[in-house]
Amino acid sequence: MPGADYIYPNVTEVTRRGGLLERWGLAEPLGCTYVEIPADFIKNRTEVERTGQDIGSMLTRSSVEQLYRQDAGLPHSLGYLLHTDPGIPRRDHHGRQVKAELRWRDPEWVIALGDMLLEIGDFLGVPPDIIEIHPGDRKNTHADIATGMHTLITAHQNAFGVEPLVLLENHKDQSISTGSQMRAFWATLTELEPGIADLAGIALDPWHLHAATREDFARSLRQIPPEALKAFHIHTDLRPPSVTDNVPWSEVFSVIRGLPGRPYIKPAVYQKSRVTEAVAFCEKMLAAPQVGYAGPQA
Ligand SMILES: [Zn+2]
């Protein structure tokens, strides 16, 4: 399994949510094949002022037109990922905490989310290649999430005639945070929705897995079925990782190198100036199986 496809992360220097071409201009020189486009709900005061919608609302068509930029002449090689709302707390203009609830258990909510993503894809001019979602709290069962993934795939197939990859990201504070939870989720998905097993998967965030499992990290990592692992978010608290981190990156990349398919890697740093360093770290770790360990066997 040589190499990986890189996803250029959502860096803060891009104006508002931006358009595809501006991000592609940053991504292409680094050899990234995809760009990440944020697809959060209304998330800050500026967006409230521009759209007239409340914090945590799903975007209407006119809000999509306010917040994103439409470009002509998109290159055919350009692909993108929609990163949907992570369901984390945000501050409204009174300083109150507002948290958009991820309601996979509610079929109407899932359809409304799908509609919002379709509006974004339609406005940008090309459908997304990948959609990332988050589990939310324990009120969402694994079956609810698997069914929701199927609904999003079908909505895109019906609207655009192409099926995106839909990936579930683990999060330390949400209902799917450990390797055993990811394994249980994948068992439910493949039993309930076998037809989407090739289009669904886990986007593993090792930093979040480490925050949730600590000294049990290596064992927990190995509990995730390799066929479920389709993407990785590589960062150390949103900064470029290093081999001296608490997260045992050699373990992570050993799993990545052993996967049956070519993975997607998103160096999840938020400063433009640090993406090169994060990509270089991944390239080095993908290339070098045994970095310098020559000690005695225990
Ligand atoms: Zn995420």
Image: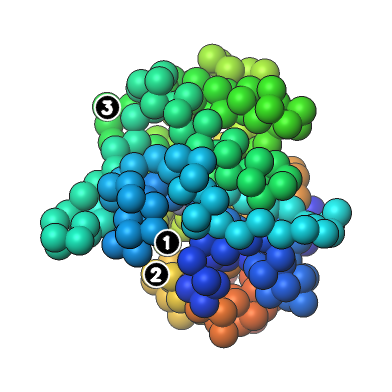
Q: Nearer the viewer, mark 1 or mark 3?
A: 3
Position of 79 with respect to 251 (left or right) is: right
Looking at the image, the residue that sits furthest to the top is 192
Whether 166 is drawn above or below 284: the answer is above
Q: Position of residue 153 (x, y in %)?
A: 62, 28
Q: Position of residue 279 (x, y in %)?
A: 65, 74
Position of 175 with respect to 186 (left or right) is: left
- In front: 61, or 241? 61
Residue at the disc numbered 1: 207
Mark 2 Cα-neighbour bin, 10 Å: few <14, some 14–19, many ≥20: few
Q: Amino acid at mark 2?
A: Asp
Q: Amino acid at mark 1?
A: Trp
Residue at the disc numbered 2: 237
At x 50% / y 20%, what residue is drawn?
A: 147
Looking at the image, the residue that sits furthest to the bottom is 273
Mark 1 CB near ligand 1 (8 Å cut): no
- In front: 146, or 96? 96
At x 35% / y 64%, what residue is drawn?
A: 46
- In front: 125, or 215? 125
At x 68% / y 27%, what residue is drawn?
A: 159
Whether label 1 touches label 2, CB < 8 Å = yes
Residue at the disc numbered 3: 139
Whether 26 is drawn above or below 198: the answer is below
> Which element type, helix, strand or loop, lies under badge 2?
loop
